[in-house]
Amino acid sequence: MSKTITIDPVTRIEGHAKITIQLNEQGLVDDARFHVTEFRGFEKFCEGRSFWEMPGITARVCGICPVSHLMASSKAGDAILSTRPPDTAVRLRRIMNWAQYVQSHALSFFHLSAPDLLLGMESDPGQRHVVGLLQQYPDIARRGIRLRQFGQDIIRMLGGKSVHPAWTVPGGVREALHPESRDEIRQRLPEAFDTALLALSLLKDSFEKFERETKTYGDFPSLFMGLVTPEGGLEHYDGLLRVVDSEGKVLVDGIDPARYQEIIGEAVEPWSYLKFPYYKPYGYPDGMYRVGPLARLNVCDFAGTPRADRELRQFRRLGSLGKPVSSSFHYHYARLIEILFALEKIEEFMEDPDITRTHIRSWAGVNQPIGIGVSEAPRGTLFHHYKVDQQGILQTVNLIIATGQNNLAMNHTVKQIAQAYVDGNHLSEGMLNRIEHGIRTYDPCLSCSTHAVGQMPLHVQLVDAAGQVVAEQVRG
């Protein structure tokens, strides 16, 4: 008799979701699904607003990566104005974006995933969180907290506050970087570098322990997509779209992100509020692709900074015979390399003598009815697509969020882990946490809320075909 296991809510992710696991009569996994159970409707309620308001509004999509929406929305506004922000404004936008990478990736590694990686996937759930990490590894946990704080402080120095700063606007930014802030950033960079290198060392030392997880936590063929510089380097703010397949063959190269609709389609399923983007030439669901840190390191030819390039060379040895790195478990590694890259770029920009210039905004009116802004969020490529009337009032809005683009891959990952670890005749909390960790590798950003501290509630039921509960487990 078939059964269903439900994990609701999924813990230590940013947002609300559940997982269902379908078992056959032998207690083996037939299928598994990742359901996003919240609906927010930003695209619809933004209609009728002025595009000038959109950076501040869409930043509220998420409290963890509001800067990503500030960047993409402001760039869409730049396109509507048909203007380019002053060079200093572009550099300042980039600095804030890299600062977000530091704080967001540090949160993912130290707060959300390190409890599993350092304390154990099947350790006591009452201790398997950031507070338990502080108790057993106080120096590591504190340094992770300070690294995240450094990223947040840079955002605050530029935008006035670390969450939802109303700073980037169509045409540029509102405030310049003060020389005192530049000097403080310079002084704090050495500690940030030390912590990033410590995290890399800790993770690489654990690879042997997690050899089985590496092979079962989302290790499958897929496409990868991300932005690259015109030269093929790692890019987080601007650039061109590139798509490669699981063999490393480049399918799309050098396409203007404003043409994204030529290669990306969006599907929906009745069991999730999260859309399912796919690579159009391959159709749905065969056009599954991944975005984010793993994808960005797979599609770029080089990083472009000394330390990150050294790590990237080591990272690529994890791929089979020179192919892209396919295991989603290595999103953790890619995330730490991107922290290192972001710190190096921030350090480089702090030495720019023009970085404190006050010419930081261009002014214009509505010159184009369509504005498409694309940027790389920590979790992957983010698209904002606006259509306005002559007064700049939004007629339609389309947002393609990075986590949505990983949706097919996350569902595939959940199924793969469940088939490797779940025994329907003998459930354990640790088994279920492993499935949750497969989702954490993608660091999904589903809304503003974060489940990071404490023993989160988990309710699991096995239900037979007649709807009767035959086994149950509750925590929290």
Image: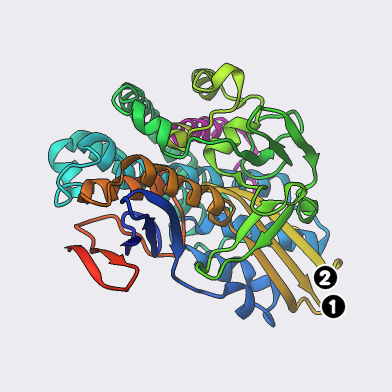
Measured from the top left, where is residue 160 in percent x and y?
A: 47, 59
Q: Which mark is residue 403?
A: none
The quarter of the displayed image where residue 366 is located: bottom right
Please name the amino acid that badge 1 sits on.
Gln
Left or right of 401? Residue 65 is: left
Measured from the top left, where is residue 133 in percent x and y?
A: 19, 42
Please name the amino acid that badge 2 sits on.
Val
Left or right of 457? Residue 381 is: right
Read off the residue under disc 1.
390
Q: Can residue 171 be seen in this view?
A: no
Q: What stretch is highlighted in magenta?
A: 335-359
Read off the residue under disc 2.
366
Q: How is the image coloured?
A: rainbow
- Do the numbered discs 1 and 2 sit on residues whose CB atoms are within 8 Å? yes
Nearer to me, 368 or 242: 242
Measured from the top left, where is residue 132 in percent x and y?
A: 16, 45
Where is 175 relative to 110, above or below? Answer: below
